[in-house]
Image (cartoon, grey):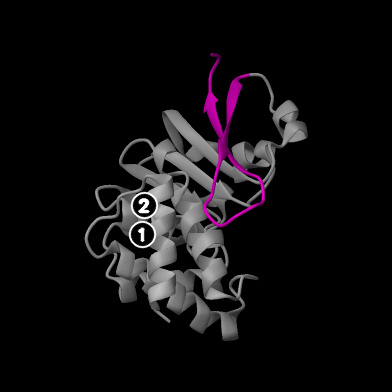
Amino acid sequence: MKSADLRAQLARGCAQLDVRLPAGAEDALLDFVTLLVKWNVTYNLTAVRVPTDMVSKHLLDSLSIRPFLHGERIVDVATGAGLPGIPLALACPERQFVLLDSNGKKTRFVTHALTALGLRNVEVVQARAEDYRPAELFVTVISRAFASLLDFMRLAGHLGAPHARFLAMKGQAPADELQALPAGFRATVHPLTVPGLEASRCVVEIQKGEA
């Protein structure tokens, strides 16, 4: 599975994103793709089945938001198969990540993946976002295909420390969702160019408080 073509695709995509991976991270990311392919057969973790598509739609898409991370403590809400949390944790070993999901099947896979990949800067928590009460709040709160912007802030807003950044990964800029945000939130849409993806991608950065 760790073919020269996948390695070249990943390296080329990281160069286009200006992401410099630490030693060993490239191998670990490709090992993660191998795990996804294997577990997908039984657990149906993702609709993406082809390894080359996983590199672009999962790995590079996840890494595209790296420039928008802030602080040392980051939570990935409704992480599913560990996306974008695992690729970001591999790329940012100096940061601490919590991968949060209520689905036991998916948290079992993520826990297995952390052990297989040797990731020590990640904690897995099985809980609903609205029920999770961490001992320490997060500087960056991420969601990928989780909910509307309003529901994201309603369900996960309590996880952010003062001046936290909330990053919602989206396709096209969600104009209706942006308009639905109440007063007291300011949002900035950052267009993303993900190598290998023709579809529109963006990340909406939300902060509490007036501009």
Instruction: Please name the residue shown 44% across and 64% down the image.
Output: 9
Q: Position of residue 25 (x, y in %)?
A: 29, 62
Q: Amino acid at mark 2?
A: Phe
Instruction: Please name the residue shown 33% across and 69% down the image.
Output: 28
Figure quadrant of the N terminus: bottom left
Mark 2 and mark 1: span between their CA atoms? Answer: 6 Å
Instruction: Please name the residue shown 66% across and 38% down the image.
Output: 149
Task: Identify residue for label 2.
Answer: 97
Q: Amino acid at mark 1?
A: Glu
Q: Is residue 43 left or right of residue 140?
A: right
Figure quadrant of the C terminus: top right
In the rendered image of this protein, does residue 209 appear above or below residue 162? above
Q: Check disc 2: other Cα within 10 Å, few if <14, some if 14-19, many if 20+.
A: many
Task: Identify residue for label 1.
Answer: 123
Residue 113, numbered label? none
Q: Position of residue 30 (x, y in %)?
A: 39, 71
Magenta residues span 184-211
